Image: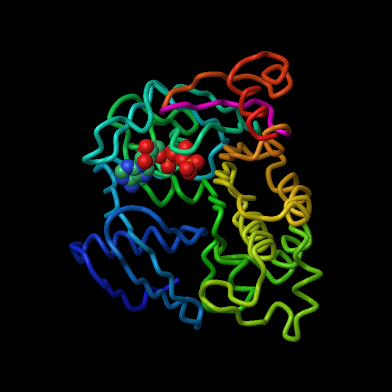
Amino acid sequence: MGLGVWEITSGRISLGGVLAFAAILTYLYAPLQELGQLRVMVSAATTGSERIIELLDAVPPLADAPDARRLARAWGHVRLQSVGFAYPGASRPAVQGFTVDVQQGELLAVTGASGAGKSTIAKLLLRFYDPDFGRIALDGVDIRHLTLESLRSNIALVQQETLMFHGTIRDNIGYGSKTATDQDIVEAAKAADAHEFITALPAGYRTVIGQHGHGLSGGQRQRIAIARAMVANTPVLVLDEPTASLDSHTFDRLLGPLRRLTAGRTTILITHDLRLTANADRVLVLSQGRVVEHGPPGELLAASGPYRELHMLAR
Ligand SMILES: Nc1ncnc2c1ncn2[C@@H]1O[C@H](COP(=O)(O)OP(=O)(O)OP(=O)(O)O)[C@@H](O)[C@H]1O
C-alpha cells in the first residue's frame, strides 16, 4: 500500500509526525474522527485509487517505544488495571481507578450517563492517549510496549458515525484488509445484511460513494461499517455507540449483523442503549469515570442499583 499526498490544513505537527500517523492509518481499517486538536487531511494512494480521509481534530500520534514489539494476531484477552486518565488541561479525570478483565470472546457492555468516561476507555485502548496511572494489557503485554500498528491491527473500531471515503463500496468494505478477495467482501456484506441493498444499486459493489457516504442511509452506512470490521477480522472489537441515532426499525435490522460480528471476538460495546446491553455477557456501569456496578445484565436488572435506575430513566 503506497502513500500519496499529505496535507495539513491547520495546526502544529511535524512531518515525521504526519508520516508516522500515515503509517498507522494505512493499517487502521476504521476512518477516525474526533481525536484532539489538529485538523489533518490525509490522502493515501492505494491500489490505483486515491482515497481521502479527513481526520477532524486529530491528536498527534503517540510514538512507539524504542523497544516496542510487534504482536501478530492476538488471542484477545484485554485487561485494564487501575487505569486513571485526565485529558490535557482538564480539571478532573475522565477515568479513575478503572479495572476490568475482558476474556477472549467475551462481550462486555460499558454504559452510563453522558460524560461518564465510556468513549475515553476506547481512546485509551486504541492508544490515542496513554493512561496517567495503571496499565492496559493485550494478551498480558502492556500496550505501550507494542507497536501502534500491531496494536491497532488487532482492534477494529465501529463508531456511531462511520466515515466513508470517496471510492467504491467494495473498497470501502475492504479497507481493513490488504488481501481481501471479492468473495471475502461479498461474504462480509452478506453477514452484515448489506449485500441485498448493495446489489440493488445500479453499479452494485462498484458503486462509488462520496466521502461521507452520501446517498446511503445511516443504517446502510453502519452495515458497511460492520462488513468492514468483518473483513478486518480482528480478534478485538470496540463498538462505540454503533446504533446511536438510528430509528427503532433500523436498530432492529442491525442486531443480527452485530451478533454475527461479535461472535467469538472480544468485544467492548460502549452504549447508552440498554436494549444492546441486554445481550452482553457482562455490563459495566460507569459514573464520573468510576465503575459503580458490574455483572451480568440479568443480575443487575434484578438488583436495585445504577443499572436498574438507568432502565427506569429510559422508560
Ligand atoms: N478531548 C477532550 N478534552 C477534554 N475533555 C474531554 C475530551 N473528551 C472528553 N472529555 C471529557 O471527559 C469526560 C468523559 O468523556 P467521554 O467522552 O469519555 O464520556 P462518555 O461517557 O463517552 O460520554 P457520551 O456518552 O456523551 O459520549 C467528560 O467530562 C468529557 O467532557
- Look at 65% across and 31% down and name the residue there: 106
Relative depth, front residue between 175 and 94 = 94
In percent of width and height, residue 142 lies at 38, 31
Using residue 291 as the reference point, say whether residue 124 is left or right of it: left
Q: Quadrant of residue 12?
A: bottom left
Q: Is residue 135 visible?
A: yes
The secondary structure making up most of the magenta span is strand
Count of picture labels = 0
Taking 138 as reference, is 207 above or below it? below
Q: Residue furthest bottom?
A: 202
The quadrant of the rendering that contains the N terminus is bottom left
Q: How is the image coloured?
A: rainbow
Using residue 92 as the reference point, say whether residue 28 is left or right of it: right
Look at the image and give the residue range highlighted in magenta.
279-288
In percent of width and height, residue 135 lies at 36, 27
Q: Is residue 58 magenta?
A: no
Relative depth, front residue between 8 and 277 = 277
Q: Is residue 281 magenta?
A: yes
